[in-house]
Amino acid sequence: MKKLIMSIAVALSALSMHAGDADFSLVVPLPQTIQAQKGAGFILNATTVVDVQGDDATLQRDAQFLIDYVKEASGIQLTTGKAKKNVIILKLNQKLSGEEAYQLTINEKNIVLEAKTTKGIFYGIQTLRKSLSFTPEESITFPAVKINDQPRFGYRGMHLDCARHFFPIEFVKRYIDIMALHNMNTFHWHLTDDQGWRVEIKKYPKLAQLGSERPQTVIGHNAGIFDGIPYGGYYTQDQLRDLVKYAAERNITVIPEIDLPGHMLGALKAYPELGCTGGPYEVATEWGVFDDILCAGKDNTYTFVKNVLDEVLDIFPSKYIHIGGDEAPRKRWKNCPLCQKKIKELNLQPKGNFPVEAQLQNYFMSQVTKHLAAKGRKVIGWDEILEGDIEPGTTVMSWRGLAGGKAAAEQGLDAIMTPVDYCYFDYYQTPEMPRDIMLFNGYIPVEKLYSYDPVPADASEAMKKHILGAQANLWSEYIIGHELAEYQVLPRMAALSEIDWMDFSKKDFGQFKVRETHMAKIYDHYGWKYCKQMWKDK
Ligand code: TNX
């Protein structure tokens, strides 16, 4: 019955509307409140002007985004200017609260977009953009409404692994564009791994020269057959700086990840003296976890890591730096005289069920953390870092389920939730058969992801306080080419955006599907690939 009433209501509102009208009920993530106002709506046409109040340069730039979006979506060319009516006003208002909040007030005369910060203005503009029909129009009617909106979480993240497969910088910008449309604000960039080092480091040129190239790549799920084709690629520091700026203009902070002390074969190939055995090492040609990691017993290793990170800090101004910490086997350290000497010197003792080498790993990580803290930065690590003593102020990225987030919060540490069962976008989003591409064997359909709550209602107070938000990861062992990358993240990024933005109690998968049908038109408009399975499922 409820469903029937809903569909009648939707049908009736559709009847009174022209197909090209703006419709805020179709925006993803759905704004927190949309209240209808008395009176007629606003008619936007080629004579509408955008009035940027004040002299904030960022606001000027945001106005240009708005003008570009309207042009892309409808063909209507707006200009900036001043007017009494037929005007869209953008203004900062210190009386409003919320770092990313905005308020939109629409009536016959004008659209007023106000926020405390330019971040809020940017999201208001995204909402205006997503309300458009993306069909050529001469005029667009906006309903008379008042919208008050702000995100549930301050950390809304997407990750991209450019180590297993390299994505050219043009694609990374496209990925940032997709994120911006979905109000995501953090890009976690996985830049180094066993299969390739992808950052130019001036002090250690061999990282890019040798560490970025593998001789060949395994076919399929480590089937033992190789393609025989050398594979490589890295980003210059200029390219990275340009990307940081591009993302910042779209309110996206880039957090670089230099994965330590494991997943380091790229670096070990270039500088074999940094490993326990001294090598020689090869950049990995298969997927998985490898025994050779950085030696924690040599002073050189610490110097190397600090020097590398100093250059990374210079490129990436983010408050957080991700230093990995995942999947580092301690086999080499057990047999390495220098690592064992270090353990003795430091008088490290095993903790709980974990061997003493886990404490050595945490010593290693805490040296790095202290170095970064002295330069005003904070550290994020994968949840394995909880296996030893951890530096205060470290943020845990919880990937192996809820446990990491819980344990972190109980120790008073912040956590970012990226559980493998919900947030791994390298997994399938289509059911068992038929599957036309080879990926990891996990299955995360959009509906399952949509049901995820980073802070469940029964969570402890500690969790409520310390969970910063949710992130999804696109590991790229099997992600070859930008079309597949887009297909894997869409439409799942839209579901993630509602997880991070909306109150859990307001979410409804059926309604999300209706909104997403509209969003798919926007994806089509920009030529982004996406998976259509959600619309095939009942
Ligand atoms: C686990 S999540 C990894 C990655 C893999 C991924 C594949 C994490 C911290 N490590 O190295 O690419 O699984 O899904």
Image (cartoon, grey):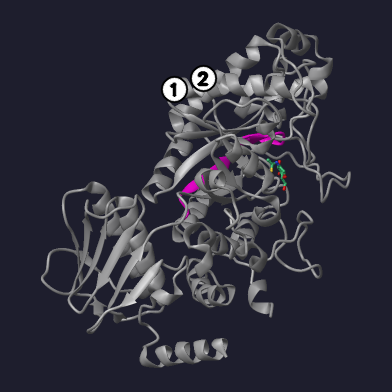
Task: Say whether marks 1 and 2 touch (CB < 8 Å).
Answer: yes
Q: Which residue is mark 2?
A: 371
Q: Residues within 10 Å of mark 1 (few under 14, many from 20)?
A: few
Q: Residues within 10 Å of mark 2 (few under 14, many from 20)?
A: some
Q: Point out residue 238 in the picture as x, y percentages from the top left corner.
A: 45, 34
Above or below residue 265? Residue 246 is below
Magenta residues, start to end: 184-197
Residue type (three-letter) at the residue carrying disc 1? Lys
Foreground residue, 534 or 229? 534
Q: Point out residue 30 in the picture as x, y percentages from the top left corner.
A: 45, 68
* Residue at 12% in and 64% down: 82
* Residue at 52% in and 30% down: 393
Q: Quadrant of residue 195?
A: top right
Residue type (three-letter) at the residue carrying disc 2? His
Please tell me the numbered disc located at residue 375: 1
Q: Point out residue 484 in the picture as x, y percentages from the top left corner.
A: 65, 59
> Which quadrant contains ligand 1?
top right
Ligand 1 within 8 angstroms of badge 1 C-beta: no
Q: Name the dominant secondary structure of the magenta segment.
A: strand
Q: Please, what secondary structure does the residue beneath circle 2 have?
A: helix
Q: Point out residue 466 in the picture as x, y percentages from the top left corner.
A: 52, 43
Q: Quadrant of residue 46?
A: bottom left
